[in-house]
Amino acid sequence: MERFKTIDTTDIAAFEAVMPGRVLVGQAVSEDYSHDEMTEYGLFMPEAVLLAQSAAEVSAVLRYCSGRHIAVTPRGAGTGLCGGCVADKGGIVLSLQRMDKVLEVDTANMAAVVEPGVLLMEFPKALEGTGLFYPPDPGEKSATLGGNAMTNAGGMRAVRYGVTRDYILGMEIVLSDGEIITLGGKTVKNSSGYSLLDLMIGSEGTLGILTRLTVKLIPLPAANMTLLVPFDDLDLCVRAVPSVLACGCEPTAVEFMEREVISASEKYLGKQFPDRQADAYLLIRIDGPSAAALEPSLETLTGLLLSLGARDVLLADTDERKAGIWDARGAFLEAIKAGTTSMDECDVVVPREKIAEFMRCSRGISRETGLRILSFGHAGDGNLHLYALRDELPDSLWHNRRAAAMNALYAQARVLGGQVSGEHAIGHAKVEYLRSALGERQMALMCAVKAVFDPAGILNPGKVCGG
Amino acid sequence: MERFKTIDTTDIAAFEAVMPGRVLVGQAVSEDYSHDEMTEYGLFMPEAVLLAQSAAEVSAVLRYCSGRHIAVTPRGAGTGLCGGCVADKGGIVLSLQRMDKVLEVDTANMAAVVEPGVLLMEFPKALEGTGLFYPPDPGEKSATLGGNAMTNAGGMRAVRYGVTRDYILGMEIVLSDGEIITLGGKTVKNSSGYSLLDLMIGSEGTLGILTRLTVKLIPLPAANMTLLVPFDDLDLCVRAVPSVLACGCEPTAVEFMEREVISASEKYLGKQFPDRQADAYLLIRIDGPSAAALEPSLETLTGLLLSLGARDVLLADTDERKAGIWDARGAFLEAIKAGTTSMDECDVVVPREKIAEFMRCSRGISRETGLRILSFGHAGDGNLHLYALRDELPDSLWHNRRAAAMNALYAQARVLGGQVSGEHAIGHAKVEYLRSALGERQMALMCAVKAVFDPAGILNPGKVCGG
C-alpha cells in the first residue's frame, strides 16, 4: 500500500483551478526536478510540479493535499546538497521559484521583506544605493533566500556576521492545513513565547511552507581587504586559525584551501590562481569603515600569521586580484564535481580548534578507504566540506568505500564534539547520520514536533526526521 | 479538585532522600521565593523549595514529580519581571542557584561551560586574563546565566553583539520524565535538524530544566568610549537613533534616558548625574581594538548627532566619568521602584524606527489614564521598558488605570508591528497579552509543543502558554 495518495486527473484539475497553466505533469516536468545538486542521492520524478505565485495559492494547495493525504515537497532553486527538495516519497513538488519579488526595502528599520524565491545573487541589486547589505553569503549564489532560510545556510561571512538564522526577523508560513501565520516581524529582539520562528528556520519545509521572509540588513562596510596566506602544509594552515580568531581583528571570512582543489578550480575556470608557491592557503577577509581603519588589523594579522609559520601574507588590494581569489574559491564545488564521475558530501562542523585534528583524520580515512577525498571550507567556523569522489570506481567498490568513508567521517566528527551538518542541513540523505548523532530521544522529540505542525505528515515527508 | 498533587510528608521524604538537607518546607521557606522582582503580580508561597546541586538530582526530582503529577517551578536568582519563576499553581520550587560553577573556560574554542546558577556579575571573573568576554549584558547583574538563557535576556550591548540566544551554543536539559539530553555543543554553526536548542532558549523552564550551558565568547575589545548626548526633548532624541545605527560606526549600546528617571536615579544612588543641561539623553557606547581605531567613529558620530539636533556630544573619557553614567543607567529600575509604592511593567519591542512614535503614544496613554509612566530602554533595539507607577492610588483606581494603561500600551505596540516582550519574556503575567498578539493558532501550536516535551504538564505550569 502506498503511504501517500497518488495524484490522479481529479487532483490535477483541482490544482489547475488554483493555479491555471502552472501545473506541470508528464513530459512537461523537467528532469531537473528529480534531484538537487547531489544526484548521487537518487532521482525521483515528482508526479506533478506546481509553480506557486502567492501564499493564497500555497494555502489552497495545502488545504487540498492535507485532506487527501498527498505528499508536498516545497522547492526553491534546487541547489541543496542533501536531497531536501526532492519528492522521494512521491506526490507533488511545490515550487516557490516564481515568488521572487523583493517586496520592501525598509532602510529606516534596516530590514527587507522578500518572497522566498528571491535569488541570493539578485538580492544585492535591490539594496544598491541604500548603504545596507544582507550578510549571509553561501557559496551557491543561485540559491533562493527561502531555501537558505529553511536550511539555515551559512556561507563565507559567517565568521563575523553569523548565519542565515541571525538575519531572519520574521516569516509568513502556510501551515499544513492551509492556515497562514506570521512569525516575528521587523523587531530585532523578541522574547515573546517559544521561538517558533527559530524552529521554522532550518526545518526544510517539513513544518510549514515559507511564503514571505523579513530579513535584517546592516550597514555596508565601506572597505574590505583580502589576505591570501600560503603555508607549507594544511596542518600548519588550519592550526593558525584559532589565533586569527582570537586576535581581535574580527575577520569576516577565514577559509582554507588546498592545492589539489585550487588546481581543479583553475582547470574548471580556465584561469590561473594568483599564487603558486604553496600547497595550502588561508584566505582571510576583513571589513571596516575605511581602508585606513583596517590598517591596524592588517598589521596585527600579518605579524601573527608570519609568527605562526605562514610563508608570506599576500594582500589582494585591487578588485581584480580580489576577484581572482574569490572566484576561484566560489568555483570549488563545481570544479570538484567536474573532475569526477559522482561524489558524496559531508558537511560536518567541529569545535573550531579541532579542525586540524579532523583534517588529519580525514586524510587517514581517505588512505584507509582508498577513496579520493577533497575538502575545503569555513576554517573560521569549524565547518568543513568534504567530498568523497567516485572517479572510475565500479558500483560495488564505490558503494562500499563511500559508506565506509562517510561513516568514519561522521563518527570522527562526533568524537570531536561536532555536529552532522554545519550549513547544508539533513534532507533525506543525512537522516541516519543525524539519528546516530542525536539518539532516539531527540529524534522522537523532533518527530513529535513535526506532528504538531503537520499531523497528516504530508509536508516534505522523510526529510529531517525520517519516517 | 486540585490540578496538581499537593506535597505531603511522603513526598518530602522522597525529596530528602535525593538531596539531604536541601529540602525547605514551612518556616524554612523564605518569603523571597513567593515572588520575583514584580510583587505586583502576586505572592505565591511554594509548598517546598528544593536546592539542587546536580543534573542527577534534578533528574531524580523530575522523575518523581512527573509520576505523581507534582508541579515543578525552576528558579534561578528570582530577578525576573513577569512572574516566570513563582509557583503560582502550587508544588515545588526547584532552585538551581547552588549550581553555580564555571566548569570550563575553553580559550582555544572561545567557549565556556557553566552551570545555570552562575551569576552574570560573577562570570567575568572566570574570564579574566583570557582576553575573551561574554557580551550579553542585561541590566540585572545578579541574574543567573541560566535565567538569562531561559528568558532570552537582552541587555545593553545587544545593539552590536546580539542577545543571549546569540551566545548559547549548547545546553544540557533534564526532560520532564527525568531523561537528560544534550543540545548543541561547542560548534558555532549547526543545521542538524530542528533547533531544539533555540526552542529551549526563552522557554522559561516550561519544556525542560537547564542544568548546563555552553556559551560563546568573543575577543574582548581593548578600548571603548561612552558618549552622553543631551537633546532638548525626547522626541528629537529617539528620532536620531536610526541614523546612529545606519552610520556604519557599529555602536555597542544606544540607550535613551529622561530627566525624571535620571533624577530618580540620582536620589536613589545619592550621586549627581554628570550632566544637567537637558531633559533627554542618548547614551552611546562604541568598542574597538584601540582608542585610535575609535577616533573616526567618534568624529562621524559627533558630526551626525549635532546635525540631528543634539545640544552637545560629551565624551566620557575616564573610567570615573564612564562609571558615573553607566551606574546611573544601571540603577534605573531600582530607582523607579524606590520612588513609588508598586508598579506594573511593559517590555515591548517595536521596529527601531517606531520608537519615537511609540513614546509619543505612551505619553498620551499616561495623560489619558492619569497614571505616571516612566520609561527608559534600549533605543538601539526598539526595546522599551515602561513602568506604570501606583504612587498613592487606592486599589480600585490603580487596578482600573493600570489595566487601561497596559492594554493601551500593548495594543499600540501591536499596531506599530511590535512584540509583547523584547527581553523580559512572558511568565504568568503576560500570557494574555501574548495571546492577543499571536492569536489562538500560535498559542495552540505552542501548547502542543509544550505537550511534546512535558506531556504531564508539570514543568512551570501556567507560564508562557497559560493553562
Image (spheres, coloured by chain):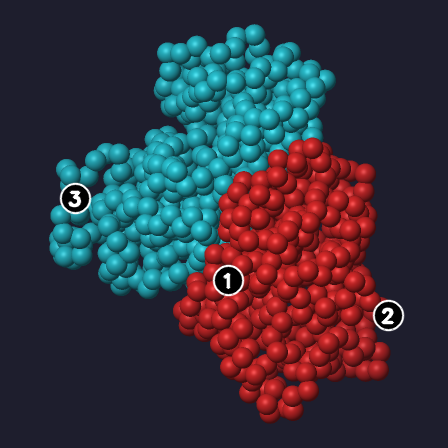
Chain colours: A cyan, B red
In the rendered image, residue A466, in percent from the top left (x then y), is placed at 43, 48
Closer to the chain start, of discs 1 and 2, is 2
* Residue for badge 3: A25
* Label 2: how many Cα within 10 Å (few below 14, some 14–19, many 20+): few
Badge 2 element? loop
Q: Quadrant of residue A36?
A: top left
Q: Chain of mark 3?
A: A
Q: Which mark is residue B21?
A: 2
- Give above or below for A374 relative to A199: above
Which amino acid, by three-letter code, is at mark 2? Gly
- Give above or below for A331 relative to A38: above
- What residue is drawn where x is 50% and y is 68%? B360
- Give above or below for B100 relative to A323: below
Please name whichever residue, A444 or B259, is drawn nearer the observer in this view of the structure.
Answer: B259
Answer left or right for A112 relative to A405.
left
Answer left or right for A254 relative to A327.
right
Q: Quadrant of residue B237?
A: bottom right
Badge 3 element? loop
* Residue for badge 1: B356
In the rendered image, residue B314, in percent from the top left (x then y), is placed at 69, 49
- What residue is drawn where x is 55% and y is 33%? A289
Which amino acid, by three-letter code, is at mark 1? Ala
- What residue is drawn where x is 52% and y is 17%? A316
- Give above or below for B408 relative to B160: below
In the rendered image, residue B354, in percent from the top left (x then y), is placed at 47, 60
For the residues labelled 1 and 3, the Cα–Cα distance comes to 54 Å
Badge 1 element? helix
Please name whichever residue, A25 or B269, is drawn nearer the observer in this view of the structure.
Answer: B269
Location of the N terminus of chain B by quadrant is bottom right
Which amino acid, by three-letter code, is at mark 3? Val
* Label 1: how many Cα within 10 Å (few below 14, some 14–19, many 20+): many
